Structure formats: structure tokens, C-alpha cells
Image: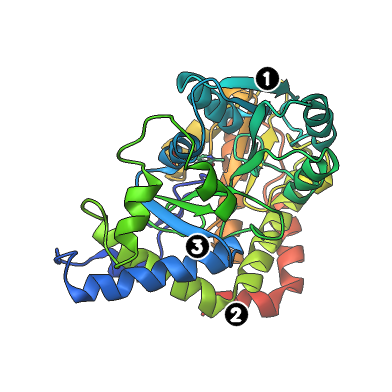
Amino acid sequence: MSDQNPVFIPGPTNIPDRLRSAMQVQTRDHRAPDFVETFAPVLEDTKKVFGTKDGTVITFPASGTGGWEAAVCNTLSPGDRVLVARYGTFSHRWIDLCQRHGLEVEIIECPWGSGAPADKFEAALSADTTHKIKAVLVTHNETATGVKSDIAEVRAAMNAASHPALLFVDCVSSLASMPFDMDGWGVDIAVSGSQKGFMLATGMAILGVSPKALAAMETATLPRTFFDFKDMMAANVSGGFPYTPPLQLIYGLRESLNMLFEEGLENVYARHSRLAEGVRRAVDAWGLRLVAQSPELYSDTVSAIYTPKGLDSNALTQQAFDHYGVSFGVGLGEMHGKAFRIGHLGSLTDVMVLSGLATMEMAMADLDYPVELGTGVAAAQEYFRRGQGAAIKTAA
Ligand SMILES: *Cc1c(COP(=O)(O)O)cnc(C)c1O
């Protein structure tokens, strides 16, 4: 029965029945009119989630990591310099990918729990008078620490330095859950995936690409075949794919977009922000502390929470899994053993979140952390009660 429990890992997320059904399709010929008529509108509608009119949506059968690779290899050349801040596991992995592609990576080291340092970006870009830096890479929502960065501020820093670098943003754990404004923020490539905010199975990298990034492709010489934007766009024009598309996922994405638009993107964001605040109130009631250093950095999709000294965060998540059949996020990288994570994104309601908080309380009590059962749950309940109208709307 524990397969009925929701997961509280920050991706892959719970797949609602409606989307599981939508992905249950028999093999169809991807060259037949039915697929062609489905696919083009899916690409068009996904633009609304990225917040772009000018951009192009490109998708590959891959996970988010494939999206990082596609962004880099289509627009850059060996030896190009990119500017990145490292403040968690995901920003670190993107750096590693760039290094393995032979790029020169200028790294700004930041404490875990902080976000993208716009002021330091501005200083580095202003110092780069010969424009060696070709791209600035930012992880919008650092899933390892539960930190959301301000992309508009990064864009403002780039403009203040009058620097022509491209802006690449990893929005894998924020898109379709937190506001994203690709055009407004001047994002050149936004990288996401199917298994988080879109509530689907893993298997699609989903990218928004600006006209400026497409222009950069003309002179970029990093090798690419599977991830070639040009091949993909040429096939997409007639509703097709340069190789076999992940058909079931694309039908799933159609239905996911229907669900997001039916709820309304603004309501989706409001729901995530409410769920997140409920979790934070519980954390506070437990006497625990978030990894995110200050309120403006708090993520609405995942909270990373320090365990007190002497309580191994991995033992806690293990206890929740072994005894109650509920998964929470483990501490990644520097947070290994020090912090656990509650994922609160995708297909989740207030009531589901309460069950996660109650489970965590039991696991903490089992490991002799002096938590009074129900305190975190009650703090979240008090908060959710006030948002009742919105909660009922999402339950429909
Ligand atoms: C999940 C995630 C990714 C992508 O990971 P995949 O496992 O390759 O899909 C990238 N960045 C962030 C911030 C993530 O949360």
C-alpha cells in the first residue's frame, strides 16, 4: 500500500492519474497526421509556461542534464569562457559538464544556502572588457539547498556591465511551479525537464531558446548530433522529429499543459507558494532551520532543512522510508548527513503536504529528536486554513 503515498522528493514528482492515463497510449506512427497535429501546438503552448513569445521551444528525449548539454554544445565553441556561480550540487554539475566540453569556466564560489550573486557577476563582466565571456549560467532554483535566485537581477547586472554574453538558466525545478519570465528577464536558453513541474515521467529535456541563442549557433563549433537544434527545428517545422520522438511523453505534455492552464498558471504559482509557506511554518515549529540563508531566497518548490547536531539527516530520511514508506530528499553534496529536503512541487495539495509533515514528525520522534508530535502539522494547518478557497480550487 505504501505506493499510495505521495513522494516528497523534489523530482521526479507525483504523477496525477490524469497524466498517467494520457501517457498510456499504444504505439502510433509518429509520421501520421495525428501526431503531427498534436506536436506543433504542444511546442507552441509550452512557450506560455516559459513566458516567451519570441523564443522557440525545443525538446529532446533526455533528462534535464541533456538540456544543459544541448544549451552548451549548440551555442559555444571549444575554449569559450563561461561565467558560473557554484552554490549547490546542480550548479556544480553544470560546471562539470562545461569543463568536460572543453570550455573555460570562470567560477564564483558562493556559500551553500546563498543564491546567484548579481553584484559579483556585474564585477566579473565589467572586468571582461574584451568580451571573452560568452555565456553566464545560472541555476534558478538550486534543488540541493532550496534556494531561488533572482534572474531579473542577474539580467540587470549584465545590462549594467553592457556585456553581450548569453544568459542560460536552469529552471528544471522551478518551471511550471514558480513564475518564470523568459522574455522579461532576457533569458537566452532556459533548460527544463518533464519530471518536475510538468508532473510527467522522466524523459524529456524541454528548452526555451531565444533568437540571440539561435544566431550564436551559426558560429558555434562544439560537436553536436543528437542534440542539434538545427536538425530538430528543421523537422519540427512540419510537426516532425529528426528521430523517434518520445510519443507517450509528448501526449503526456499535452495533458499536463491542459491541467496547468485549467488551474491557471497564476493559481499554480500561488498553490506552490502556499504549500511552501506551510512547510516553512512547520520547520519553524520544530525548532529547525532552513539551509536558504534569507527569506527572499526561499524556494517555493523545495525546502532544505538542517537537522540538529547529532541527528544524521540520512538516518531521518531512511527512517521515514523504512517505517512509513515515504520518500524525502536526502542531503546532497555538502549537505550530506546535515540536511534533508522536503519537495513540495508538482501534483500536491495542502492535505498531501500535511501527511508529509506528520510523517517527518514521526521519523524525528523515532530517532529521539524532541519534537512534540503535531506541532509542525498544526502550524501548517493554521496557515492552510486561511487559504481554503484556493485549496478547494486546486483539488478539483
Ligand atoms: C532535477 C534537476 C536537474 C536535472 O536533472 P536530471 O536528473 O538530468 O533531469 C537539473 N537542475 C536542477 C536544478 C534540478 O533540480
The way the protein has been coloured in the rendering is rainbow
Q: Is residue 2 visible?
A: no
Residue appearing at x 46%, y 59% in the figure:
57
- Quarter of the picture containing the N terminus is bottom left
Name the residue beneath numbered marker 2.
393
Between the C-alphas of marks 3 and 2, the distance is: 13 Å
Name the residue beneath numbered marker 3.
347
Badge 2 density bin: few <14, some 14–19, many ≥20, Cα 10 Å = few
Establish if 55 lies above or below 204: below
Question: Callout 2, which amino acid?
Answer: Lys
Residue appearing at x 39%, y 57% in the figure:
200
Q: Secondary structure at mark 1?
A: loop
Name the residue beneath numbered marker 1.
310
Image location of residue 141, percent across then percent down: 64, 44
Mark 3 / mark 2, whichever is N-terminal: 3
Establish if 263 lies above or below 141: below
Residue appearing at x 46%, y 45% in the figure:
326
Q: Nearer the viewer, mark 1 or mark 2?
A: 2
Question: Quick check: 307 left or right of 245?
Answer: right
Between the C-alphas of marks 1 and 2, the distance is: 42 Å
Image location of residue 158, percent across then percent down: 77, 41
Whether the residue carrying mark 1 lies under 8 Å from ligand 1 is answered with no
Between the C-alphas of marks 1 and 3, the distance is: 34 Å
Q: Quadrant of residue 117?
A: top right
Question: Callout 1, which amino acid?
Answer: Gly
Mark 1 / mark 2, whichever is N-terminal: 1
Question: Quick check: 14 left or right of 350?
Answer: left
Whether the residue carrying mark 3 lies under 8 Å from ligand 1 is answered with no
- Frontmost residue, 123 versus 153: 123
